[in-house]
Amino acid sequence: MKVFVIGTGNLGSHLCRAIEAVSRVVDVAFAKAKLKQPQSQIFLKGYYNHSGYDLEDLKATRIDDLALLPEYDLVIIATPDDLIATISNSIQTNAVVVHTSGSVPMDVLSIHSNHGVLYFPQSFSKTRDVDFSEIPICIEYATTIAQERIEAVANTLSQKRHYLDSNQRKQLHLAAVFTNNFVNHCYTIAQQLLNEQQLDATLLEPLMKETLRKAIDLSPVDAQTGPARRGDHQTITAHLELLNSTQKEVYKSITQSILNTYGN
Amino acid sequence: MKVFVIGTGNLGSHLCRAIEAVSRVVDVAFAKAKLKQPQSQIFLKGYYNHSGYDLEDLKATRIDDLALLPEYDLVIIATPDDLIATISNSIQTNAVVVHTSGSVPMDVLSIHSNHGVLYFPQSFSKTRDVDFSEIPICIEYATTIAQERIEAVANTLSQKRHYLDSNQRKQLHLAAVFTNNFVNHCYTIAQQLLNEQQLDATLLEPLMKETLRKAIDLSPVDAQTGPARRGDHQTITAHLELLNSTQKEVYKSITQSILNTYGN
């Protein structure tokens, strides 16, 4: 089963490496056992990127012209969201075509009779190692052929498979914005506050870690503490006086949401 | 050095246990070495709580009447913030008196000539184990005598000591609200969104962990990603349509703060 990846950014580059790593391991195992590999064996046959640079650690071939795509079994579009439809419409292939976006519906790929989605709710960076076996894989498919090929790739990467339709995936992606983007920005504001008073940036690291552990152990709704949780309006007022106008709006909206959640 | 703890809630109960555990270890060590213990040796001599219940795993005595306080060397007030001044004013002692609050200024204790603060920027729960050696201890003191006794206790608990005045501590406490209370509420909203679509509550745990690791490794300001970071107003608009009015206000204020931070 020949896989082609379009886009070698934060996610695409890691996907290429993970698929090639899996097939290398399997190659070695079959060679040792002196067995012929089954046709279902997955390997990365090629990749494309807009800027035309090689991923030099890979054996797979870079293809520069998507119009010249040879026959693959699965094409994974791992580009930014706003390019997916255009790229999908520009390639001619009999392969199963999937994208990897949280917020783009599956049916933007409907020009291809067999299509689907492989979504990883994780934050990827080129410079950080990824262990796909730790990451849930969210799958959607339009046909049985798409299902078989998507599951074959998913199975090689992780045992954590979930079947989500486009609406569920969109909602998960939004939840991921709160979990990643907004949590990280709360950390950023905390750092701004420490910096203003020349306080050591690492002072709150033990609290960052305990906050995460406690939310996972107890569930976040049960782990909530603080002035808004206990309806302590005196402390809330004192805190607002220490913040600049942008920080104040963040403080007020989250505080109001906590007050609403717990009926304070 | 005889220590007395007032308040055995989330922090106070752990403090009692930690101080008693340290003195037990030292007792055994001196006994083994057949040495007389130095007078500076710290031990928990007694504690008080409002509801009059024993911490049964402790050797220290519970005292029910703060007016009958015998002579101690250090009294730690670990009660809720709004009780600190009243309790401080109601006890007569020659001891060094400290409180453990992030947001209450040191000088509410000024009726006692030797006073100070021992603040731990961490989230404590009665049911969760605490390793004080991992937690920074923030110290403030009014006199040299207060300094000596506070440092003596701090040294037995952790090597991570920081000297903060009341303004710095108040700012640190506010930063801790963003780091703990507000981060946790972002997790809560994410869970609400997953629940609405009957999605598995654990789907975002790998992302929660990676978000923390990345913020610590890169610094949160450099780790920021997402629609607001890249100025993607189309995705922001689509997200707002999926949220209820309270969630929408949180989304808008944090998004605006990210847009301001990165000049988008």
Image (tube, coloured by chain):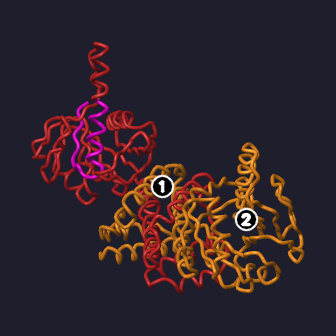
Chain colours: A orange, B red
Query: Mark 2 belongs to which amino acid?
Result: Gly
Q: Cβ–Cβ below 8 Å for labels 2 and 1? A: no
Is B248 rendered above or below residue B222?
below
Label 2 crowd bin: few (<14), some (14–19), many (20+), radius 10 Å: many
Taking the image as shown, residue B28 lies to the left or right of residue A45, namely left
- Res. A126 in view: yes
**Residue A199, image x, y percentages:** 52, 51
**Residue B110, image x, y percentages:** 27, 48
Q: In which quarter of the image is the N terminus of chain A?
A: bottom right
- Where residue B102 sits, quadrant-wise, is bottom left
- Find numbered disc 1 in the image and state the secondary structure of the residue it sits on: helix
Looking at the picture, do discs 2 and 1 lie on one chain? yes
- Label at residue A12: 2
Q: Mark 2 against mark 1, which lies toward the viewer?
A: 2
Q: Is residue B22 magenta?
A: yes
- Label at residue A208: 1
**Residue B169, image x, y percentages:** 42, 53
Is B158 rendered above or below residue A179?
above
CA–CA distance in space, label 2 to label 1: 30 Å
- Where residue A73 sits, quadrant-wise, is bottom right
Taking the image as shown, residue A168 lies to the left or right of residue B27, namely right
Q: Which residue is drawn at 90% across and 74% down?
A: A68
Is B224 rendered above or below residue B257?
above
Taking the image as shown, residue A248 lies to the left or right of residue B118, namely right
The segment highlighted magenta reads B1-23
Q: Does the magenta stretch include residue A44?
A: no
Q: Which of A200 and A21 is in front in this view?
A: A21
Label 1 crowd bin: few (<14), some (14–19), many (20+), radius 10 Å: many
Identify the subunit bearing mark 2. A
- Find numbered disc 2 in the image and state the secondary structure of the residue it sits on: helix
| Between discs 2 and 1, the one toward the N terminus | 2
